[in-house]
Image: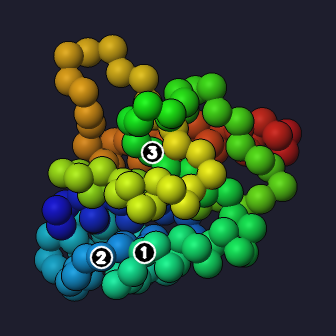
């Protein structure tokens, strides 16, 4: 888990993410493994562990964020088919690698997307999925402002 957290900081920094929130977890952000994997990016991205991520997600709804969860569900749409609402700030929600995004959180988000996969495995590493999603969303933002 520490390597994934450090990697999330690096990929978030690469795409200009301003904040990382970790729900229902206790994380030692001074862990040598996190710091080594994150490099200095942990110093440039606001971050926190929250006891109740559902409350924070509800706050983001009232702040008019577009909430996008990455999770394979019956109602999820392919990330490649999803168009962001350019008038809103974006909150991308990813789940813990073993459990995914909780049902409680999925009920709060506006859209659930999945990444089409063509191999034999049915899931991918949380950092890899986050990187793919950030890349796709960034492409849309860049093309809209060009």
Between disc 1 and disc 3, whose residue precedes? 1
User: Is residue 38 among what the camera can see?
Assistant: yes
What kind of colouring is applied to the model shown? rainbow
- For residue 93, which numbered disc appears in the image? none
**Circles 1 and 3: CB atoms closer than 8 Å:** no
The alpha-carbon separation of the residues under discs 1 and 2 comes to 7 Å
Give the image location of residue 105, x and y in percent.
45, 61
Category of crowding for the residue at label 2, using alpha-carbon neighbours closer than 10 angstroms: few (below 14), some (14–19), many (at least 20): few
- For residue 70, which numbered disc appears in the image? 3
The alpha-carbon separation of the residues under discs 1 and 3 comes to 16 Å
Q: Which residue is mark 1?
A: 53
7 with respect to 86 (left or right): left
Q: Which residue is mark 2?
A: 24
**Circles 3 and 2: CB atoms closer than 8 Å:** no
Label 2 residue SS: loop
34 with respect to 133 (left or right): left
Label 3 residue SS: strand
Give the image location of residue 42, x and y in percent.
38, 75
User: Is residue 45 among what the camera can see?
Assistant: no
Q: Residue at x 30, y 76 (%)?
A: 24
Label 1 residue SS: helix
**Circles 1 and 2: CB atoms closer than 8 Å:** yes
Asked if 76 appears above or below 22 in the picture, the reply is above
Asked if 18 appears above or below 83 in the picture, the reply is below
Between disc 1 and disc 2, whose residue precedes? 2
Q: Residue at x 35, y 57 (%)?
A: 102
């Amino acid at each position: 888990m520490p390597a994934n957290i450090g990697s999330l900081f690096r990929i978030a920094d690469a795409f200009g993410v301003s904040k990382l929130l970790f729900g229902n977890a206790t994380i030692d952000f001074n862990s040598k493994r996190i710091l080594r994997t994150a490099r200095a990016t942990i110093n440039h991205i606001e971050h926190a562990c929250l006891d109740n991520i559902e409350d924070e997600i509800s706050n983001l709804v009232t702040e008019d964020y577009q909430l996008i969860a990455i999770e394979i569900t019956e109602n999820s749409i392919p990330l490649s088919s999803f168009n962001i609402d350019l008038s809103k700030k974006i909150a991308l929600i990813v789940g813990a690698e073993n459990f995914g995004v909780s049902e409680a959180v999925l009920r709060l988000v506006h859209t659930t997307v999945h990444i089409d996969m063509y191999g034999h495995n049915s899931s991918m590493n949380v950092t890899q999925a986050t990187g793919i999603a950030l890349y796709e969303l960034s492409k849309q933002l860049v093309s809209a402002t060009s």
